[in-house]
Amino acid sequence: MLNPPYRILLPSSKEVLLSTQYFEEGCILLINKPKGWTSFDVVAKLRNLFKIKKIGHSGTLDPLATGLLIIATGKYTKLLNEFQNYDKQYLATFCLGAITPSYDAEYEPLFYQSASHITPEMLETFLQRFRGEIEQIPPPFSAIKIGGKRAYELARQKQDIQLRPRKVHIYQFIITAFHSPENIQALIYCSKGTYIRSLIHDLGQALGVGAYLKELQRTHIGTYSLENAWEIQEIIDFVQIQKQ
């Protein structure tokens, strides 16, 4: 296993992007994954851009989520499983008073209920149930494999999906802004394997009004911070300009 400090390519070192050898030998890139991109889209773009074969990512983000994605190349791909085990921190925006099949904004909300009676004080009381070690069932629209197929593939075919609950740890679940029951912001610090969509969905069920995730941004993976991440378009533009 490789020992820290790892070779991390920060945005302050743009010129290193021109070194193919650097990427082939191995390095770590922190990327701010754009909304609408899959985690694999980011890997595929970088693989094509730098013409390297050995590249991967750790900690998949849903297409609608943004934020920190760790990319490793060369010998550093050996570290991807280690990164996968790190705790994560997220900023989430969610809505009370409706649910969606995917537990997020991918689908139109259903089963509207009034949540006007939910106050910050009432919400805080319920949040206590979702701190510490809890059990959660992953969302049906997830990448978990069932009989060789992804759960989201079966869910889109409207097949009945039975996913097993798993234990996760929620270190922090703090409301940072309560604009209205339909627009609540929270900071969530949690263990690996936590589905924020399920966390918000389960909170809505406990409150009796439903809830779904509107936006999600991952800000930390272990000690790695989004503050040190590259914008993917920044990399694309820089490399393409140098090739002209």
Image: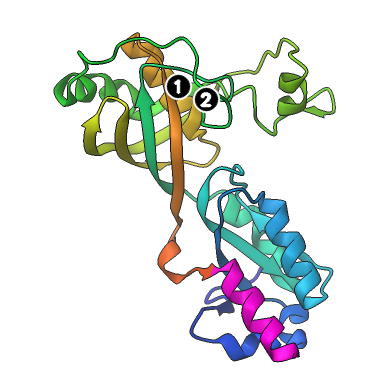
Residue occupied by mark 2: 103
> Going 17% across and 21% down the picture, which residue do you hit?
119
Q: What is the CA distance from the residue labelled 2 to the residue labelled 1?
A: 6 Å
N-term-proximal mark, 2 vs 1 = 2
Residue 132's quadrant in the figure?
top left
User: Image check: 173 left or right of 225?
Assistant: left
Above or below 20: residue 1? above
Residue occupied by mark 1: 201
- Given residues 5 and 217, the one toward you in this image is 217
Which quadrant: the N terminus? bottom right
User: Image check: 49 left or right of 38?
Assistant: right
Residue 30's quadrant in the figure?
bottom right
Above or below 120: residue 59? below
Q: Report the disc number at residue 28.
A: none
The question of residue 233 being in magenta is answered with yes
For the image, the number of numbered tags is 2
Label pair 2/1, CB-CB below 8 angstroms? yes
Q: Which residues are magenta?
A: 231-244
Would residue 227 be visible to someone looking at this image?
yes
